[in-house]
């Protein structure tokens, strides 16, 4: 019989959401330290201070997380006496910054509250963290015991971030439903996986419906219902899926294509993770012969400038050997309903080149 615990994320969303800090954090202590990226902290500082104003929670300091999610930075933060003496860590920023605090708090046992300032991934909600080495190269995944105690999603601050973050976030979020339902297809799912896969079925429709409007709104820094729905999709829906499902279901061929592309200099230099993943979604849907879905996503990508062909991500046919070598090595395509061969991915890419809508 099983013997396990599931710790679920909790969150608040709104333009004035930091005003809920005293009420939500009060059981966890009085002294908080903000740890985050420099830009993120500058953007959130005023609202955070206002949020704890007139409460018995004090923000002791704003500390830079070190620039990358690495064990070196976790150690650096743990040695900072102000950080070490805080009851609560307020992690502010994007994925790498939040992941650094998640790893640290798992080690120190400090209460962690997360304040995402961009919506480009679900790091604020997931349990897993991505660790890079001191040279900024991916090292490994780290698995804390539970997610942050609470996540405060300030839609106003997120709407003020550069629109590229949401744009790429949309591209990445598009992959979740397709990858999760594909990699779990034909499996007999236990309780948590069943819940996670079912939650993943709510990713694509809101993105296709609201994505374009949300992207337009964020360009003019306007908080709208559409933007809110898309932010929730990128941070919460995909995050909940990750919390429930085994890692095999979390990503699949769209991400393998992305990792394959990262072997090329132009991808690293000029293109964002979610942007390339959204191209990978098209390759995956073509490979799995889901042409109707592929065409829907193709039209959506075109409508907001996400890639639909190799040229859009500056990849040439001659680069494909390198891309496919790497893609075939990735663990993302190991747990799939049928064997995915190198030739199948190549054919899907070439088929996709011929699509004109
Ligand atoms: Zn991704």
Image: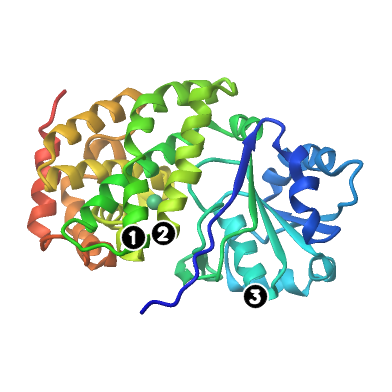
Residue at x 37% of width, y 47% of height:
199
Q: Quadrant of residue 187?
A: bottom left
> Which tag, 3 or 1, sits closer to the chain's start?
3
In the rendered image, the vertical position of residue 300 relative to residue 36, given as above or below: above
Q: For the residue labelled by badge 3, is the local secondary structure a helix, a strand or a loop?
A: helix
Residue nearest the observer in this picture, 200 or 131:
200
Indicate left or right for 136 with 245 as reference.
Answer: right
In the rendered image, the vertical position of residue 161 relative to residue 214, given as above or below: below
Alpha carbon distance from label 2 to label 1: 6 Å
Q: Which residue is mark 2?
A: 244
Q: Report the disc number at residue 107.
A: 3
Alpha carbon distance from label 3 to label 1: 27 Å
Q: Residue 258, position in %: x, y? A: 31, 52
Residue 134 visible in this rendered orientation of the protein: yes
Residue at x 84% of width, y 66% of height:
82
Asked if the residue under mark 1 is in contact with the one under mark 2, i.e. CB atoms within 8 Å, the reply is yes
Q: For the residue labelled by badge 2, is the local secondary structure a helix, a strand or a loop?
A: helix
Residue at x 19% of width, y 56% of height:
185
Indicate left or right for 136 with 53 as reference.
Answer: left
């Amino acid at each position: 019989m099983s013997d396990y615990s599931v710790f679920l994320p909790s969150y608040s969303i709104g333009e004035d959401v930091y005003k809920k800090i005293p009420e939500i954090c009060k059981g966890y202590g009085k002294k908080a330290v903000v740890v985050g990226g420099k830009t993120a902290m500058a953007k959130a500082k005023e609202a955070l201070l206002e949020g704890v104003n007139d409460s018995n929670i004090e923000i002791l300091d704003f500390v830079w997380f070190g620039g990358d999610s690495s064990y070196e930075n976790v150690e650096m933060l743990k040695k900072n006496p102000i950080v070490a003496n805080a009851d609560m860590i307020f992690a502010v920023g994007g994925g790498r910054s939040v992941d650094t605090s998640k790893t640290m708090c798992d080690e120190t046992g400090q209460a962690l509250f997360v304040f995402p300032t961009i919506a480009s991934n679900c790091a604020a909600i997931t349990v897993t963290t991505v660790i890079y080495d001191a040279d900024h190269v991916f090292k490994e995944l780290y698995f804390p015991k539970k997610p942050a105690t609470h996540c405060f999603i300030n839609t106003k601050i997120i709407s003020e971030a550069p629109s590229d973050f949401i744009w790429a976030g949309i591209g990445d979020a598009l992959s979740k439903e397709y990858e999760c339902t594909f990699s779990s297809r034909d499996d007999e799912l236990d309780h948590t996986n069943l819940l996670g896969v079912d939650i993943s079925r709510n990713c694509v429709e809101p993105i296709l419906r609201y994505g374009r409007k949300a992207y337009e709104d964020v360009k003019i820094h306007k908080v709208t219902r559409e933007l809110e729905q898309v932010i929730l999709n990128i941070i919460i829906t995909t995050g909940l899926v990750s919390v429930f499902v085994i890692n095999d279901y979390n990503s699949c061929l769209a991400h393998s294509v992305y990792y394959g592309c990262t072997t090329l200099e132009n991808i690293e230099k000029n293109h964002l993770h979610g942007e390339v993943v959204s191209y990978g979604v098209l390759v995956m849907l073509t490979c799995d012969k889901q042409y109707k879905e592929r065409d829907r996503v193709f039209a959506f990508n075109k409508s907001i400038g996400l890639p639909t062909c190799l040229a859009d991500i500056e990849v040439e046919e001659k680069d494909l050997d390198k891309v496919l070598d790497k893609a075939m090595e990735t663990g993302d395509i190991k747990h799939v309903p049928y064997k995915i061969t190198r030739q199948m991915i190549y054919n899907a890419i070439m088929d996709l080149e011929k699509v004109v809508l």
